[in-house]
């Protein structure tokens, strides 16, 4: 049993294991029996096992097996999964007010009811299932990869089983969704913390699932970026693409070219003060994301979209004439001189420093809308820049305008077109390229929801939630097989987006729609079912203080309730 003093029981009496003459095992049996009797009289869990977003691969509910988290619960975990257990505890403590201590390995004796994470082999879940009375899932659960997991919920507890910490983390996010919506509040709430019984076996459809945040058009401080990371992780998205450089601002410090951030970072759209990340800031973002199993993909946009760099270093400009700072929103007018060796020294230094700061495998070269660098000048620049990236050990990602350039090993093209017939991109795939799908008329999150949306654009059309959801990345591009699709990404350009609240308004509720396309099997794709599941997340976002667009496509609860506050003196841990 834990060495800390036991809390009083719900009736306020002394815990049974402290009464004279009672054995801990008997006390635990009595406690469990009383609690199960209470559960039989309690209503079903307010969330159904199949309400998860994105939709799991397999769901087998057991309405007779709901689990209720109580104040004496602990999280038991294998050592390699301890960090995931700590994060799960951080999510659950504020609203429950429970201590939720974490123990490595089995607790002494039977212990209190526990929430368990384990990295036990996925092919052998039956030992726990037999002991805990959980429901199994037919067929083998092996082969779920690093991101897959199995979740079993019985009256005795909740267990997540995975082969790697990423799978445990995704399973923990699922558990978080299965608690009542009040779990996302910041203060203790009066709630029965029930989780619906049954089993889930789950894994992602695509390995790359992401969103892009443009911090160049408008600068967003580190704390805002970290909150966006949390939003991605909540819905099992695993890549954050940061658009770090553009005409309006350069946002990452480069020691060998210090004026890039000092001068190039001092502007933004509309004439605001701009800003930039120190290398320590960037490392903090990368580390925060990594803890949440999100990989940061930095973008240094070349050879166009470079006005901020040219303001800082005019010797990179054609004609060596310094341009004025730019705070508008037009594109295609700026470029570094592809005929000057100084340009390639610049590219080598910048790419080298950014690559050294980035543990993930990807480095994004941009490459779009370089309208004044044409033909062989463009392809020659791209091919040389690709070799510079490869020399750092990173894999090149670029917008699909890179397609005509010679193929680099492992190259990934990010397709943002609006017409699914793109022979040039299909040819690049035949030469070995893989694709990230970001169709502008489906997942560009800077597009308005409707004509009256107060911010955003409409050049690619209006994108309501159904339009963001109702397409298939595996078949979207003519001549491109599903196996060439690495995944999906939803970009948010910020010409008209200026605050974190506006970022969230444009992300939600479309971000979960894109997440489901990236994670869930195609067989689960169903708009009617998705909109019903998504509706239940409105109260969660409200509880978490997330701004969102109350889309008329979704049957939101008529009046989301504010969680009732506890009246005892329990204080929640904050984070």
Image: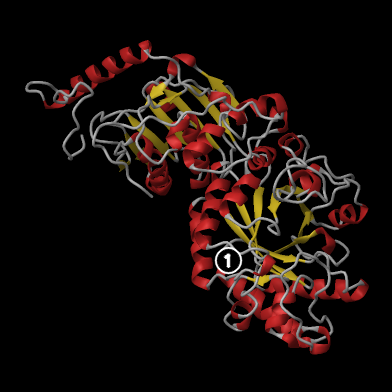
Q: Would you identify the image quadrant in which residue 36 lies?
A: top left
Task: Say left or right for 332 vs 8.
Answer: right
The quadrant holding residue 408 is: bottom right
Image vertical order of residue 250 relative to residue 188, above or below: below
Would you call the spot at circle 1 few (<14 residues within 10 Å), some (14-19), or many (20 or more)?
some
**Residue at left offset 68%, top offset 66%:** 270
Q: Classify residue 80 as left or right of residue 367.
A: left
Q: Where residue 350 appears, x then y in whole percent?
A: 65, 77
Q: Is mark 1 on a helix, strand or loop?
A: loop
Camera-side residue of 335 and 538: 538
Q: Where is residue 384 in the image (x, y as percent from the top left)?
A: 79, 75
Give the residue at mark 1.
358
Q: Which residue is drawn at 62% across and 58% down?
A: 498
Q: In which quarter of the image is the N terminus?
A: top left
Percent across and percent down for residue 202 are: 58, 34
List x then y, in percent, for residue 35.
30, 18
Viewer-proximal residue among 195 and 94: 94
Whether residue 122 can be seen here: no
Residue 276 visible (yes or no): yes
Query: How many marks overall?
Result: 1
Q: From what the image shows, is residue 320 above or below residue 539?
A: below
Locate residue 464 relative to residue 556 in the image: left or right: right
Look at the picture and state if 195 lies above or below 414: above
Q: Which colour scheme appears in the figure?
A: secondary structure
Q: Which residue is drawn at 45% across and 30% down?
A: 179
């Amino acid at each position: 049993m834990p060495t800390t003093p036991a809390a009083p029981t719900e009736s306020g009496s002394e815990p049974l294991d402290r009464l004279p003459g009672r054995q801990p095992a008997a006390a635990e049996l009595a406690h469990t029996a009383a609690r199960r009797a209470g559960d039989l009289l309690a209503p079903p869990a307010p969330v159904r096992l199949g309400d998860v977003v994105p939709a799991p691969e397999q769901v087998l509910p057991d309405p007779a097996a709901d689990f209720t988290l109580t104040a004496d619960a602990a999280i038991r975990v294998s050592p390699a999964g301890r960090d995931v257990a700590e994060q799960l505890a951080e999510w659950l403590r504020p609203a429950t007010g429970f201590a939720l201590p974490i123990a490595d390995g089995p607790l002494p004796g039977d212990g209190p009811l526990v929430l368990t994470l384990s990295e036990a082999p996925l092919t052998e879940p039956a030992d726990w299932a037999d002991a805990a009375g959980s429901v199994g899932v037919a067929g083998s659960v092996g082969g779920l990869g690093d991101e897959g997991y199995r979740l079993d919920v019985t009256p005795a507890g909740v267990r997540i089983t995975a082969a790697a910490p990423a799978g445990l983390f995704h399973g923990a996010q699922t558990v978080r969704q299965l608690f009542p919506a009040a779990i996302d509040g910041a203060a203790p709430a009066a709630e029965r913390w029930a989780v619906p019984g049954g089993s889930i076996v789950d894994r992602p459809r695509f390995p790359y699932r992401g969103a892009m945040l443009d911090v160049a058009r408008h600068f967003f401080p580190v704390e805002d970026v970290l909150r966006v990371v949390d939003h991605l992780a909540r819905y099992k998205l695993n890549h954050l693409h940061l658009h770090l450089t553009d005409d309006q601002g350069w946002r990452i410090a480069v020691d060998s070219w210090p004026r890039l951030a000092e001068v190039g970072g001092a502007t933004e759209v509309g004439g605001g003060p701009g800003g930039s990340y120190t290398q320590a800031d960037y490392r903090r973002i990368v580390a925060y994301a990594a803890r949440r199993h999100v990989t940061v993909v930095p973008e240094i946009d070349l050879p166009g979209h470079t006005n901020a760099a040219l303001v800082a270093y005019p010797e990179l400009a054609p004609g060596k004439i310094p341009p004025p700072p730019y705070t508008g929103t037009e594109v295609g007018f700026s470029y570094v001189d592809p005929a000057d060796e100084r340009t390639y020294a610049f590219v080598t230094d910048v790419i080298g420093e950014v690559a050294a700061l980035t543990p993930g495998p990807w480095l994004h070269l941009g490459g779009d809308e370089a309208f004044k660098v044409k033909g062989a000048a463009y392809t020659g620049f791209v091919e040389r820049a690709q070799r510079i990236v490869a020399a750092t050990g990173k894999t090149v990602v670029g917008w699909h305008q890179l397609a005509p350039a010679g193929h680099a090993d492992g190259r990934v093209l990010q397709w943002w077109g609006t017409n699914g017939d793109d022979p040039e991109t299909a040819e690049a795939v035949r030469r070995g390229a893989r694709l990230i799908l970001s169709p502008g008329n489906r997942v560009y999150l800077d597009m308005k929801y409707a004509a009256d949306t107060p911010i955003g654009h409409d050049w690619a059309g209006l994108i309501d939630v159904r339009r963001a959801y109702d397409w298939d990345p595996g078949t979207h591009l003519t001549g491109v097989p599903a196996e060439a699709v690495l995944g999906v990404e939803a970009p948010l350009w910020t010409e008209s987006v200026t605050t974190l609240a506006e970022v969230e308004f444009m992300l939600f509720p479309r971000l979960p729609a894109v997440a489901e396309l990236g994670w869930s099997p195609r067989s689960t794709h169903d708009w009617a079912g998705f909109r019903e599941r998504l509706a239940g997340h409105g109260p969660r976002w409200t509880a978490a203080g997330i701004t969102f667009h109350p889309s008329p496509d979704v049957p939101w609860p008529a009046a989301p309730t504010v969680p009732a506050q506890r009246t005892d003196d329990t204080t929640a841990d904050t984070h």
